[in-house]
Image (cartoon, rainbow, N blue to C red):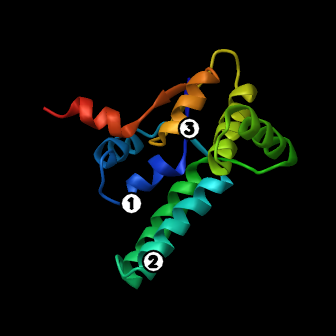
Amino acid sequence: MTFYYIDASAWVKCYYKETGTAWMQNFLLRGEPLACSYLGVVEVMATFARKHKAGEINASELSEKETALEEDWNSFIQIQLTAEVMEFARETAKNLALRGADAVHLASAIFLQRRLAATERLVLITSDQELKLAAQLSGLAVIDPDEEETLASP
């Protein structure tokens, strides 16, 4: 069985039209097992709030997106920001020169991967190029929704 860890750069595409949105929406419809750290849901919610504050979405749209996010989040494997994950994120940031959020996502994905059975695999879904490279260097398989959508275009 394959599990998918989705970071905020990919997850937010489910709620706003941009490159990679169609691929992400189709992927979510497949019902694959998804995971994300608590940081990811905070990042996506922050995007909603910033767009509302900037007048890009109204209060009704904000409420709809919050509801959809909560429904999606409740179906995810939720990786808590435990001391173990955060210590690993700190080392990851140091060793791979990652931004803080990227280090937390990579550490969370690797934390989950280490807990999967030997017959299970984890794939990271991200549109963040630095995180993508760091994940690949760490031995994770990676899918970039932007690239997948570009490949699928005629």
The amino acid type of the residue labelled 1 equals Tyr
Marks 3,1: beta carbons within 8 A: no
The label on residue 131 is 3
* Residue at 59%, 31% in the rendered image: 134
Q: Is residue 18 above or below residue 145?
A: below
How crowded is the residue under tag 1: few (<14 C-alpha within 10 Å), some, or many (20+)? some
The label on residue 15 is 1
The x and y percentages for residue 102 are 62, 45
In-front residue for pair 129/46: 129
Sequence order check: which comes first, mark 3 or mark 1? 1
In-front residue for pair 54/143: 54
The amino acid type of the residue labelled 2 equals Ser
Marks 1,2: beta carbons within 8 A: no
In-front residue for pair 88/4: 88
Question: Mark 2 — residue?
Answer: 63
For residue 57, which quarter of the picture? bottom left
* Secondary structure state at the residue bearing disc 3: helix
* Residue at 45%, 77% in the rendered image: 63
Marks 3 and 1, how far apart in space? 21 Å
